[in-house]
């Protein structure tokens, strides 16, 4: 009897993801303008980051609105022992939801400093990545920092 033949093969499917018109415009604003844009949608107000439609009724997004790089923390999750290659920071940090001034929804991001002062209701502001390091991603905002 002949032994079965066996062959091990690794197959890869490289691809590039297109952000699309709405998220592309949002990310270009971060990279090229250091501005944060939201979109006014039915039933939700100004959504940041924009998704291009209303999650309430499915209607198309409307007017683009620039929001401030400052806002209020609406949720905090502190990470005291970050895990390499899992968390975005090597030192203790906090995941936060920030309702930016002029927005009606919250943006997920991180705060790296002043963790002892950080709580729901704390005012924060965006810290921009250096011009040469901005690539058109949410990390063009390096983090948020406590301002009050």
Image: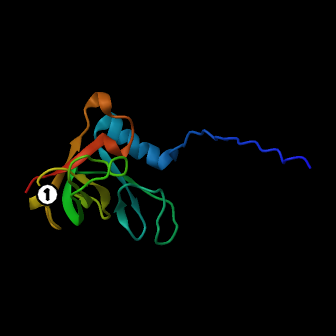
> Where's the C terminus, which quadrant?
bottom left
Q: Nearer the viewer, residue 147 or 40?
A: 147
Q: Nearer the viewer, residue 8 or 64?
A: 8
| Residue at the image position 90 percent from the left and 46 percent from the top | 2
Relative to 30, is 105 above or below?
A: below
Asked whether, in this view, residue 27 is left or right of residue 131, the answer is right
Relative to 13, is 94 above or below?
A: below
| Residue at the image position 46 percent from the left and 65 percent from the top | 54
Q: Residue furthest top?
A: 132
- Count of numbered labels shown in the rendering: 1
Mark 1 residue element: helix
| Residue at the image position 13 percent from the left and 62 percent from the top | 122
Relative to 73, is 86 above or below?
A: above
Instruction: Read off the residue under disc 1.
Output: 115
Dot 1 surroundings within 10 Å: few (below 14), some, or many (20 or more)? some
Q: Position of residue 99 (x, y in %)?
A: 25, 61
Q: Position of residue 102 (x, y in %)?
A: 25, 58
| Residue at the image position 60 percent from the left and 38 percent from the top | 14
Q: Position of residue 84 (x, y in %)?
A: 33, 47
Corner quadrant of residue 142: top left
Q: Nearer the viewer, residue 24 or 83?
A: 83
Q: Residue furthest front?
A: 1
The colour scheme is rainbow
Q: Position of residue 42 (x, y in %)?
A: 43, 67
Asked whether, in this view, residue 80 is left or right of residue 23, the answer is left
């Amino acid at each position: 009897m002949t032994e079965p033949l066996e062959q091990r093969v690794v197959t890869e499917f490289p691809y590039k993801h297109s952000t699309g018109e709405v998220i592309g415009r949002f990310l270009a604003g971060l990279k090229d303008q250091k501005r944060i844009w939201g979109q006014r949608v039915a039933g939700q107000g100004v959504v940041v980051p924009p998704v291009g439609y209303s999650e309430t009724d499915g209607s198309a997004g409307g007017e683009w609105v620039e929001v401030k790089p400052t806002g209020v923390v609406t949720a905090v999750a502190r990470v005291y022992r970050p895990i390499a290659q899992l968390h975005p920071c090597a030192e203790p940090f906090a995941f936060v939801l920030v309702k930016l001034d002029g927005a009606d929804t919250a943006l997920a991001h991180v705060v790296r400093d002043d963790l002892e002062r950080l709580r729901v209701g704390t005012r924060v502001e965006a810290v921009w990545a250096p011009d040469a390091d901005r690539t058109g991603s949410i990390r063009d905002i390096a983090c948020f920092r406590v301002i009050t």
